Amino acid sequence: MVVAVLFGIYFVLSGWEAGMSLLYLWRPGDSTPSTSNNQPGLNLFTPIWEITNVFLVFGFTGLALLFNNVLIKLSHAVLSTLITGLVALIIRSTLVIYLFYYHGPNKIRPIAGKLFVLASLTVPMSFGLSGIYFISGQPFWRNSLGLSLAGVLLLSILSLALSFAYYFLPSTSSFLSQAKFKMYFISIAYCLSTAVGLQLVINRSGRTSLLGWPYDLFVLLVAAIPLVEIGLYLVSSGRLLWLYFSLLAVTSPALLALSNRPYLIYGRQTIVSAYGAEAYGKWLLIGMVALSPLIILGFILLIWLLITPLRENKKTSN
Amino acid sequence: MDRISAGRALTGDSLGYHLILVLFGVGLPVIISLLEFYGIVTKRPRAIALAHTWAKALVILFIAGAVSGTIVSLQFDLLWPKFMSFIGKTVGLAFALEGTMFFVEAIFLSVYMLSWKRVKPWIHWLIGLPVALGAIGSAVFITSANAFMNAPAGFKVNSKGQPYDIHITQEMFTRTMFNEVTHSILAYLLSTALVLVAVYAWLYRKKRHAADRIWMRKVIVGLLSLALVFAVLLGVTGDMSAQYLEKREPVKFAAMEGIEKTEKHAPLILGGIVSGNKIKDAVVIPGLLSFLADNNFYGEVKGLNITSSQYRPSLVVHYFFDGMVFADGLLVIVPLLFLLFNKFYRRWAWNRFSLHILVICGFLAVIATEFGWLVTELGRQPYIISGVMTVGDALTTSKSVIQLGFIFPTFFILLLIVTAVTLRKTMSHKEMKQL
């Protein structure tokens, strides 16, 4: 469950990064990207980027160490999918350094911005697609369950990215830009809720572990997107929908892992037989608890430092 | 290229690239922290501003390093699943704690960068301490895992090749770990200090104003003094490690020194050309290796013949070992001479020739660190965990590994070029003028 939540946090942060890349580097509706009035938001990119990678390493290392008995199967099944993500990761970091540190934010070439957006979406997609192996017991392209989950995953990441971008879109930006963003965002969110409904039909018709209450809860949470959206617009807080998508991203891997019980890899390996860290599980817990005050302090300071300039910027723009 | 060679090449390329960033990732936070402390205590805003410039460079290196570290971590899991499965059962705690310390470093580096000029100087310096702590901590834990690979201890293996009766403290905290950790961290600190010296020596040549030159001299002399301390300590730990290797990892030691047969009064072999199982045309000093290894000119030194030929590492290790020792020797002599010249014959120290030598030393320090790790890793071959698991046994069964052997190095080179060009811009004259 902890590993699933770590991956969930990774997806939220990845969505944030993808959203930022959409907003600052490739804004639909504007012919050229503009960042001059968004510098505070752009300055947050690097700190978030570092933490995102840490969560990825943490989640994957946790999985590999605690469930070391599945590594051989995992390596054989998802190597090519994960490698695509790793290559995208290198491309994206090259572009981060080039765009943010070398070139400067005001001289961005559109092609570099588009490539950056593509790489930002490819990385979490590749990890998510690899995760489908745990649910379906096969690489995602081998069966309808995997393919339908892949579709849901793509729409989820896009929704998360667009909801972040929509939240941070400055009120001073053009009407066309705002309207296009809103249109993209809403249509993809609605596609997502429809796709999950279709996915549920595929589950019921095939042999799958996704038939318990955790998956039903997941479906309910996704299907509720339109209702939540309408509710938020009624109280004039439509931009806050990113919070709901973040909640979905954090809880979804955990709910899917719960549905998959007692399996870690459906039909192939149970959680109990996959666990292989008996020798040091206790020591690991002690180490984590000992370091947790420092990590919590760091997070509190980081959030405070991140939020303060954003608030100041919002106040100024209002 | 066969699968094993592809797997080796892929991991070797990734680790070789990652190591360049690791040494700065460990060395820079420590040096930045020392500099900021010095600036606060002596009330020198220029020193604090310099620490800020170096911290910007650290962030760029950290971005590239975080990515290569992520890739290395995942490559281990994907390419060497049997190895990771074994390691996960035995010394996985070291990997987990390394990840946690990396977490601490990443969070506090973000806080450190965002809090410049937003909190009091002392508080800012305190925020920087967990960055250095996280950097050193992650280096300690990951090196302890490597020490386990070189000299596994604290467990038994059953007939299926699975570990049991595991004692985690005996696995992690060994003499091998102490030697590797101290030696490698000192190497990172030395390399970082000398690369910074190289950058300022290069920039010094272009500075014409006397005031700029005076403060740059202070920076170079300060860093060289620090580098000299690190270099001497590195020599001491290097000697301790070599003596210990001769006892605990005799095959690796024999490959490093090019000793084919076990003998008393063993010669020290310098240079030469590897030809099959022998080294030709080398400078041979009789008895000196016995003395260095055993403090006795007639002590016995084990040769490669103590193990069968299929379990021997290649003698190519000897090249890297000699290269590393030669470079480390220079890295003690050059800073010492430069500091002496600066004290007594100042004109000799600050001419173009001397400055170019300092620039070369920066490159040499990084190369020596790479060579050191090549000796450690190649000297253990064909094993991935010494005496327990071979590299061939640990590799994934997926055939994609062959194509991957070419893809990653290409992208790593691209990332390295962009990082280097951007760093050059960060350390440019414009930044310097702001100091």
Image (cartoon, rainbow, N blue to C red):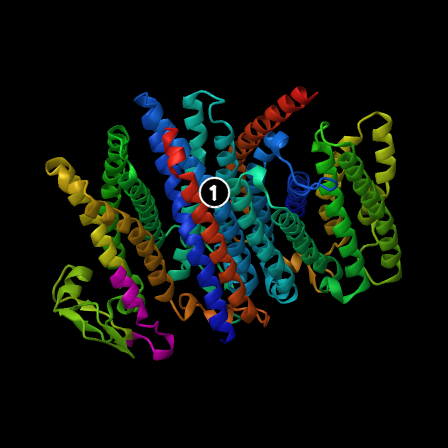
Q: Which residues are magenta?
A: B305-323
Determine whether, in the image, residue A280 is placed left or right of residue B140: right
The answer to whether residue B236 is visible is no
Looking at numbered disc 1 in the image, what kind of residue is underneath it?
Answer: Ile
* Nearer-the-camera pick, A278 or B20: B20
Q: Position of residue A273 (x, y in %)?
A: 65, 60
Res B350 seen here:
yes
Residue at the spot x=13%, y=62% of the render? Answer: B296
Q: Chain of mark 1?
A: B
**How many labels, in total?**
1
Q: Position of residue B266 (x, y in %)?
A: 16, 69
Q: Quadrant of the C terminus of chain A?
A: top right
Name the side, left or right, on which A86 lies relative to B8. Answer: right
Q: Residues within 10 Å of mark 1 (few under 14, many from 20)?
A: many
For the residue pair A62 and B124, the one nearer the viewer reads as B124
Q: Position of residue A290 (x, y in %)?
A: 50, 36
Compared to residue B414, the image places residue B42 above or below, namely above
Helix, strand or loop under label 1: helix
Residue B251, located in which quarter of the rendered image? Answer: bottom left
The residue that mark 1 highlights is B60
Q: Residue A306: within the magenta?
A: no
Q: Is residue B151 left or right of residue A144?
A: left
Image position of A72 (left or right of A171): left
Residue at horizontal 36 percent and vertical 52 percent from the top: B177
The residue at the point 41 percent across, 22 percent down is B122
On screen, B205 above or below B281?
above
Q: Is B320 colored magenta in this rendering?
A: yes
Task: Name the dominant secondary structure of the magenta segment.
Answer: helix
Residue B402 x %, y %: 54, 71
